[in-house]
Amino acid sequence: MTIDYLVTGATGLVGNNLVRVLLEKQCTVRILARETSSRRPLQGLDVEWVIGDVTDKDAVQRAVTGVNCVLHAAADTHIGWRGLNRQRLINVQGTTFVAHAALTQGIRVVQISSVDALPIAKSPQEVIDEEATGEPKSKCTYVVTKRQSEAEVFRLLDKGLDAVIVNPGFMLGPWDWKPSSGRMLLSIAKHPSPVAPTGGMSGCDVRDVATAIVSAAERGVRGRRYILAGENITYLDAWQRMARQVGARPPRWRMGPLVRIIAGYGGDLWGYVSGGEPEVNSALIEMSQQFHYYDSSRAKRELDYQTRSFDASIRDAWEWFKREHYV
């Protein structure tokens, strides 16, 4: 029997919401997951499991064989300086294996990238769309490898690959099992800060993004990029909204240079001492000073991308975390 969709990264925020959207549409779904992956995110869901890793070429080929479309959500999203080899393996080589397998099978792949792979606004008044040129400002390993993974997909387009690239913004919503971007909300609840980063984000709902990704698979134009972003707001505004939702004291000020230096380079120093890399490091601080403001007009026109309010996304993410006993 032919399977409608293969979803990679199905235990992550985007992938898990994708699986649920597909099942609601009565699609048949296969997932590629590591042996060590938690079964909890997919408990009770009617999916076919293939055990393997996107970095295993043979496992990818097995997973892709017999499906009509691949939604490639698997990625290492850590923002830092020290994970280049690991992120090249997962983000670049994994994407190459998936795209090659899709090309071999003659099926479409939707590469789920990030707005972090795009140029950034030079000021809060500028909004970036798909036609913007230039490199992202940050050279952290996540940004570099997401750009490289996109380049692999574009390269294979010339060889006949049927591919669409989507670039989601900062996503919140339910089913954030790891958690991923929801860590920001949990951190504000558990460790409220009087200061917030100086930059801005494009906040969106992962459920809206997942629905648009399926639309991209169904009717997206081959070789085209679609930004799936949302409300362009400063981090100060976003953190204040999150704090109000979780009942924490909201931040009042933007982070000054001294705080940025202490937080960023203090995290780097701790990483060198401990042999790891903490979540808060100078790469994260650098990116949080930038204005990641994006325009989703193309996706709204061509994919019928519809976005709910970011406040609703914050509320629903928080209610889900409470229901699943994260707080």
Image (cartoon, rainbow, N blue to C red):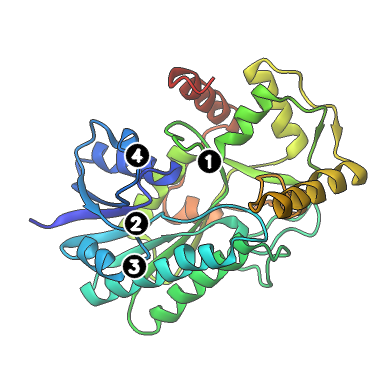
**Which amino acid, mark 3?**
Val
**Disc 4 versus disc 2: nearer the observer:** 4
Real-space Cα separation, disc 2 to disc 3, in angstroms: 10 Å
Mark 2 neighbour class, 10 Å CA radius: few under 14, some 14 to 19, many 20 or more: many
Real-space Cα separation, disc 1 to disc 3, in angstroms: 23 Å
**Which amino acid, mark 2?**
Leu
Secondary structure under tag 2 reads strand
- Whether pointer 4 and pointer 2 mark residues with C-beta atoms closer than 8 Å, the reply is no
Left/right placement of residue 29 relative to residue 90 reads left
Real-space Cα separation, disc 2 to disc 1, in angstroms: 19 Å
Residue that carries the numbered disc 1 in the rendered image: 180
**Which amino acid, mark 4?**
Ser
Residue that carries the numbered disc 4 in the rendered image: 38
- Whether pointer 1 and pointer 3 mark residues with C-beta atoms closer than 8 Å, the reply is no
**Disc 2 versus disc 1: nearer the observer:** 1
Real-space Cα separation, disc 3 to disc 4, in angstroms: 22 Å
Which is nearer the eye, 258 or 67? Answer: 258
Mark 4 neighbour class, 10 Å CA radius: few under 14, some 14 to 19, many 20 or more: few
- Tag count: 4
**Image location (x, y in percent) of residue 299:** 48, 54
Residue that carries the numbered disc 3 in the rendered image: 98
Can you see residue 290? Answer: no
